Amino acid sequence: MTAASAKEQRIAIIGGGPGGLTLALILQRHGIKAVVYEREDSDKNRDSGGSLDIHEDTGQIALKEAGLYEQFKAIARYEGEDFRLLDKTGKIYMDEVAGVDDTGERPEIDRGTLCDLLLNALDPECLHYGHKLIEAIPLDNGMHELRFENGHVDTVHLVVGADGAFSRIRPLLTDAKAEYSGLSMVELNVDNAAVAHPELAAFNARGKMFGLADHQAILAQLNGDGRIKVYLSFRAERDWLDTCDIPFNQPKEAKRKLLQYYSDWDEQLKNYIHCSNDKMIPRRIYMLPVGLKWAFKSGVTLIGDAAHLMSPFAGEGVNLAMLDATQLALAIAHYDDLDEAVSVYEEKMYVYSSRSAGESDKNLKLIFSDDAATKLKEMFDQYHQQAELKE
């Protein structure tokens, strides 16, 4: 596919999250139009996630290719790299404090703020909200017909599934399904923490706090809007959220029952539950098989969670989605043939995503194992020692 013919190819991206938006923007910067179909009726990225650490060797590369790196640096929270690790008694194993300048490798930015950066640079005409995909039908000529719930039909040369854990595009390529990882979470929020709950805000510091013990955790993270997002995490059977008798729509009673699961935990850790607002979101954590690959198929591919869903314990979810978007966009811009571009992208993606998925799975098992705080500190110590040897 030459540069001229690239502009004649119709490329559809299913999903308007960070990965899909990054792909559309980098293609746009190379003079290649794409259309983004998003099921929500407007941008909901601000509502669907907390703070993200954007890595130097993945997400930041994508931002550079998207022309947004300097804007990102101006608003990223480098102090968000602060990290505290405790066990249930309140014993501190790690208390890392980030520098005050922009030299960190993994600065934080809220998901909504990141997507605003992408949206502000993207041609709004390529965005189509309120388009829930019903099915993608392969045609004899290698193209795909896309049918949407609202009646819209499109025929495209390439459809890219950027539609997350339960992708409707993935079944075109593989029978692999997202499987329950063995981990369930209850998401809470402590609003305006510095003002409303200054003691908890001081305890949490400026970044992440991990409290680990008994195959469960309290994970907390300061967001850019001043709230602390909290994830109460449990190793549990898949149906536990349905059978645990916690009425998530009755906050007062739900908090009382949740506190029972942390009855012997330090009071400062239990304050994350006491101080949270009334909104609770129970969720199961899913993953795809580590090292998932599929046979190449003309006119269709996947990026992000649709391609390599993993637990959040490698910190790579949004970073890999944006790296996928970068690799795919650059391949499309570079290669004469669209199929060749997709094939080159997929082979690269399999290598780095498999590595990260393996790391994520290993970390999940470690974080919810016996004596997890000690083991996690030892892992970080080894990482720092290896980094020092490379310098």
Image (cartoon, grey):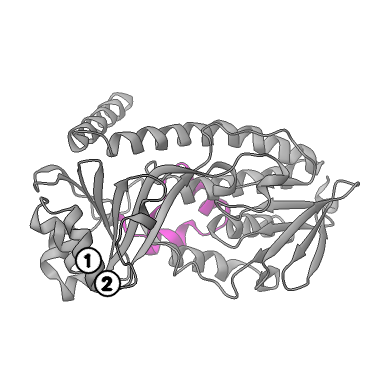
Residue 167: where, in percent of width, then height? 62, 52
The Cα–Cα distance between marks 2 and 1, rounded to whole angstroms, is 6 Å
Q: Residues within 10 Å of mark 2 (few under 14, many from 20)?
A: some
Residue 48 visible, this orientation: yes
Q: Residue at x 47, y 48 (%)?
A: 317
Q: For the N terminus, which image quadrant?
A: top right
Residue 245: where, in percent of width, then height? 30, 60
Quadrant of the image occupied by residue 260? bottom left
Q: On the rendered structure, is 8 left or right of 322?
A: right
In this view of the protein, which residue sits in the foreground, 324 or 248?
248
The reply to whether discs 2 and 1 touch (Cβ–Cβ < 8 Å) is: yes
In this view of the protein, which residue sits in the foreground, 54 or 276?
276
Residue 225: where, in percent of width, then height? 32, 71
Question: In the image, is residue 183 above or below residue 244?
Answer: above
Q: Secondary structure at mark 1?
A: helix
Q: On the rendered structure, is 249 left or right of 154?
A: left
Quadrant of the image occupied by residue 120? bottom right
Query: Could you tell me the amino acid type at mark 2?
Result: Pro
Q: Secondary structure at mark 2?
A: helix
Question: In the image, is residue 390 above or below residue 326?
Answer: above
Which residue is most to the top? 389
Residue 92: where, in percent of width, then height? 11, 44
What residue is disc 2 on? 251
Query: Could you tell me the amino acid type at mark 1?
Result: Lys
Q: Residue at x 29, y 24 (%)?
A: 389
What residue is disc 1 on? 255
Which residue is most to the right? 140
- What is the magenta range? 51-78
Residue 31 visible, this orientation: no
Q: For the C terminus, which image quadrant?
A: top left
Q: Give the tally of numbered discs.
A: 2
Question: In the image, is residue 293 above or below residue 36?
Answer: above
